[in-house]
Amino acid sequence: MNSATASPGSSSTNNKYLDNKGFMSTDQS
């Protein structure tokens, strides 16, 4: 998910990282 915000349903901020586009993403993508 290449979105600037976390996907809805991702409440774990510990799993956030920048994807290869430089957008904030989570490992739940």
Image (cartoon, grey):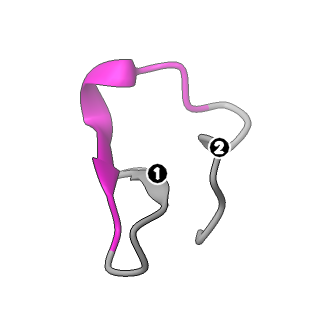
Residue bearing the label numbered 2: 5
Assign a secondary structure to mark 1: strand
* Residue displayed at 32% across by 80% down: 20
- The amino acid at mark 1 is Met
Residue 11 image position (x, y, % from top left): 53, 19
* Residue displayed at 32% across by 57% down: 18
Screen quadrant of the N terminus: bottom right
Q: Residue furthest right?
A: 8
Assign a secondary structure to mark 2: loop
Residue bearing the label numbered 1: 24
Residue 12 horizontal side relative to residue 3, left or right: left
Res 3 label:
none
Q: Earlier in the sequence, mark 2 or mark 1?
A: 2
Q: CA distance from mark 2 to mark 1?
A: 6 Å
Give neighbour class at mark 1: few <14, some 14-19, many 20+ (Cα, 10 Å): some
Residue 16 image position (x, y, % from top left): 34, 39
* Residue displayed at 26% across by 23% down: 14
Task: Say if the magenta span includes residue 18.
Answer: yes
Q: Nearer the viewer, residue 8 or 17?
A: 17
Residue 28 image position (x, y, % from top left): 44, 51
Residue 6 horizontal side relative to residue 16, left or right: right
Q: Are marks 2 and 1 in contact (CB under 8 Å)?
A: yes
Residue 12 image position (x, y, % from top left): 41, 21
Residues in magenta, as a range:
10-19
Give neighbour class at mark 2: few <14, some 14-19, many 20+ (Cα, 10 Å): few
Residue 21 in the image: above or below residue 24: below
Residue 16 in the image: above or below residue 1: above
Q: Residue furthest bottom?
A: 20
- The amino acid at mark 2 is Thr
Q: Residue furthest front?
A: 22
* Residue displayed at 67% across by 31% down: 9
